[in-house]
Amino acid sequence: MAEVMVRDGTWTFDGEILRIVPSRDRGVNKLRQLLGEVAVPLAAVAGIAYEPGKKGGRLRLRLREGADPFTQASRGRISDSADPYQLAVDAGRTGVAEYFVDEVRNALVIEQVPDGPSDRYLMPGPGVPLAVAGGDGTATFDGESFRIEWNWAVEGAKRSAGSQRFPLKDLVGVEWIPSAGLENGHLRFTIRGSMHKLAPKHDPHCLLLWGLEKETRTAALFVAAVLARLPHPSGAAEPQPALDAPAPAAPAAPSGGDDDPDALLRRLRELGDLHRDGVLTEEEFTVAKQALLRRF
């Protein structure tokens, strides 16, 4: 087994799975810590490289297009420091990093893994429930339905429309536009049968984003979880894996799905840890916990 263990985190490769575990160090981007451990099957890997620098270097993992819902959601919207598929390598660990790259590349050749697009997600999305707090409200997703609750800053038309709730089956797509300069961003849900596209501040299916760092973190996870539940962008007809299911390349294991009590308890503990570490606010923790408890 090949392993790179540095202050930024740990990458291990056993010939089939590349396992990424971010460090809990305060200097590590909160989005990576919030995403947690990521298991990447070899079939999802398009390439890997080590870039040496004056003070250490950087490992970069490149995934196949369409293999990972998180990459699909976050592309161009998060910083390099927030990218879970990059690892800052400490000075003196160059030889270990280069060996790691060689091991992964050799496995790709031996297994004849294509580097072209994948017609299905080969990795699950983030676990649910999830919540994202925007400028004029909060959106929550429990894996089956969405809810949008407005706050004091909401515009009159949205306030008149009231809280929104709709099932996943009615969702056609989700649009995430980060804020730029003085322009607000937004998170828009496209509902089946909806004919009109209103301005974000008037659309009751749209959450305004003010560009806060915490917004970006939670939006990245939120959108990735939604995409993992929608049909694959390639148009493949086969159903996508459940968010909490193991990666396809991993050995099959008995599972009760998203409503398995052990999985729900594990997710509840994770939420508590994130709340204690300051990653989730009290409001975000309360919303996510309540959505999770309703599934027991």
Image (spheres, rainbow, N blue to C red):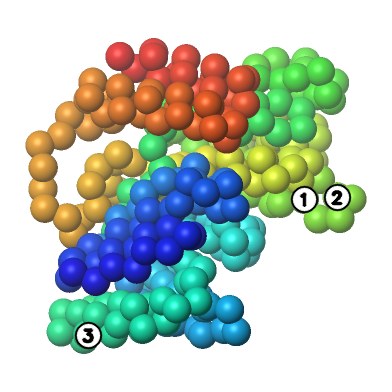
Residue at 62%, 26% in the rendered image = 281
Residue at 39%, 13% in the rendered image = 294
Q: Distance between the Cα atoms at labels 1 and 2?
A: 6 Å
- The amino acid at mark 2 is Glu
> Residue 210 at what x, y percent from top left?
78, 41
Q: Which of 196/237 is in front? A: 237
- Looking at the rendering, which quadrant does residue 107 occupy? bottom left
- The relative height of residue 212 versus residue 119 in the rendered view (above or below) is above
Q: Which mark is residue 260?
A: none
> Residue 238 at what x, y percent from top left?
25, 52
Residue at 57%, 84% in the rendered image = 53
Mark 3 = which residue?
A: 106
Callout 3: SS: helix
- The amino acid at mark 3 is Asn
Mark 1 = which residue?
A: 179
Q: Distance between the Cα atoms at labels 3 and 2?
A: 47 Å
> Residue 48 at what x, y percent from top left?
38, 79
Disc 1 to disc 2: CB gap under 8 Å: yes
- Looking at the rendering, which quadrant does residue 208 occupy? top right
Residue at 58%, 40% in the rendered image = 218
Mark 2 = which residue?
A: 183
Classify mark 3: residues with Cα within 10 Å, few (<14), some (14-19) or many (20+). few
- The amino acid at mark 1 is Ser
